[in-house]
Image: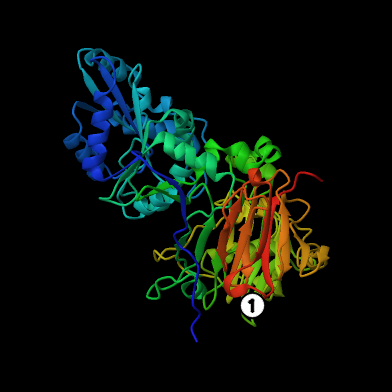
Amino acid sequence: MAYLSNYDKFPLVDFDQRGDISWHGWTAICAQINAAAEALPGKRKTIVLECYPGLLEEEVRPALAGGLKGKLVCSEEYLLPPAAIEKLVYPDVTDDEIFGYITRLGIDDFIDWKKVEALRDSLAGEETVFVYGPGAARIPTGYQLLVYFDMPRWEGQLRFRRNQVGNLGVDNRLVKASLQYKQAFFVDWRVADRHKKKLMAHWDYVVDTVTPGAPGMVTGAALNEAFARLVHRPFRVVPFFDPGPWGGQWMKEYCDLDRSRQNFAWCFDCVPEENSLLIKFNDLVFETPSVNLVFSQARALLGDPVQSRFGDEFPIRFDFLDTMQGGNLSLQVHPYKEYIREHFGMDYTQDESYYMLDAADDAVVYLGLKDEVDRDRMFSDLEAAQSGGAPFDAVKYVEVWPVKKHDHVLIPAGTIHCSGANSMVLEISATPYIFTFKLWDWGRMGLDGKPRPINIGRGREVIDWSRTPENTRTQLINDITILAEGDGWREERTGLHEREFIETRRHWFSKPVTHHCDGSVNVLNLVEGREAIVESPDGAFEPFVVHYAETFIVPAAAGTYTIRPHGESEGKTIVTVKAFVRHNA
């Protein structure tokens, strides 16, 4: 009998906000912007139409040009020439195929200020001016109305793959998508986010253009109110799924995905920097980058101690790695904090763990080294394999451990590792998610038919050679401690390693369990059971239902909450895994 999935791929937040706060379609959006402009006092009016990088210019610009009443000025005409921008960003983009350096640039660095001064003089006699594009808010000397056209990072990545958009200020849409992504990660998104954060408290309208031909707009006040309310209740971000060269078949069944696709390798179920939120305003389902919530409500969402350490970055990531009927992940290692800070400009590194959501009888993880490994020989063999010699004999150097459902494998930075085939991994990690040094990819090609980039040299610089079998067995595999138990419940500490800032707790329960945020955002997944319900003991938020394999966030401001079996799971034992930032020790 096939599994009947109840996994919600499009979680929706509805605060029942009503009134004249939302608009569908370009005609209604332009009409409302025109009406708001006409209502402004005085004859000379400047309206800023600020944009996040990644909009489909072929749709948006003609719609605005045809619908707005006034002169339309495009900010991209007042940015530096593309060659100058390429020179500007090169120190951060570098020649490395994957990695760069987190930029310190701001939007002002991309603007040609001589052109802007000339423009300002030429606009002196204009009555109604609309300034559109990235950096638009910096072009006029002042403005009376701010409309923000937003874009989630994940949708931007898809548009890179389709050759639909270029990087900030350059039309490089035919460049390899992975290089566009790298430039966006290290430069464009950092620049745009810094600029956006200054505008969010003041935006008058926000436009969602994710779905081509079906834009939506809400008032900035309504959106900001939704953010302020959301940090006092549990919620989910919108997951996204992606294939990979090692991808499997598990998520097709359990997450109800397209069965005709070759595979699905990843599900990014809680990566707020790239995921979206779906919020309903009247009859409009509005998609907004979930990182906006982090930017606008960091302290309430993350908690005081966590926000003081990470600022407005969400430090916990949950994602799925599906190798069921697939292949091994690449053999890899993540850099130490000191290395990632020095070489890439990040303040913390990608410590992580594998929680085995499911596993076949032959499932294994490659983790740590064998005793007395000859380091030079190991790297000589890796280099030879990468150069077309004999395949790398991983089991000669790396320890292989059998794993089963509900095992928890800890992977602090520096630990060589990968999940083997026939596993379904819930990866719980810190957020800097691209800093993986691949050492061996089993001689296979990527989905584009080309080898994936390997980083043997960098990997050698960060491997923790102390991860021998005894060390790995005692410190990294199922380091589980029972912390408390009562009638119908048990709480266990399952990790993470003492070098990692994330703590995880597992609860087995058939009756209600009380949780306390204790100053940190909580991220949880229902790893066993069909359904659970999250409730506030004092009714501070509406009951929130979650289903098997769904990741959900409980903001620090929610304080105390309970979880109990619900629906089909009532009377049965179910299991959650919870992650939070360790700060009280």
Residue 307 found in image quarter: top right
Instruction: Compare residues 348 and 137 and report the one nearer the observer.
Output: 137
Judged left or right of residue 32, residue 483 is right
Judged left or right of residue 536, residue 65 is left
- Three-letter amino acid code at disc 1? Ala
Q: Name the residue located 62 percent from the left edge and 37 percent from the top edge.
A: 299
Residue 381, given in percent of the width and then of the height, sits at: 63, 66
Q: Is residue 22 above or below residue 567?
A: above
Q: Is residue 118 above or below residue 285?
A: above
Category of crowding for the residue at label 1, using alpha-carbon neighbours closer than 10 angstroms: few (below 14), some (14–19), many (at least 20): many
Q: Name the residue located 47 percent from the left edge and 66 percent from the top edge.
A: 244
Whether residue 93 is visible, yes or no, is no
Query: For mark 1, what is the residue?
Result: 363
Q: Name the residue located 42 percent from the left edge and 63 percent from the top edge.
A: 450
Q: Is residue 216 above or below residue 569?
A: above
Q: Name the residue located 49 percent from the left edge and 46 percent from the top edge.
A: 290
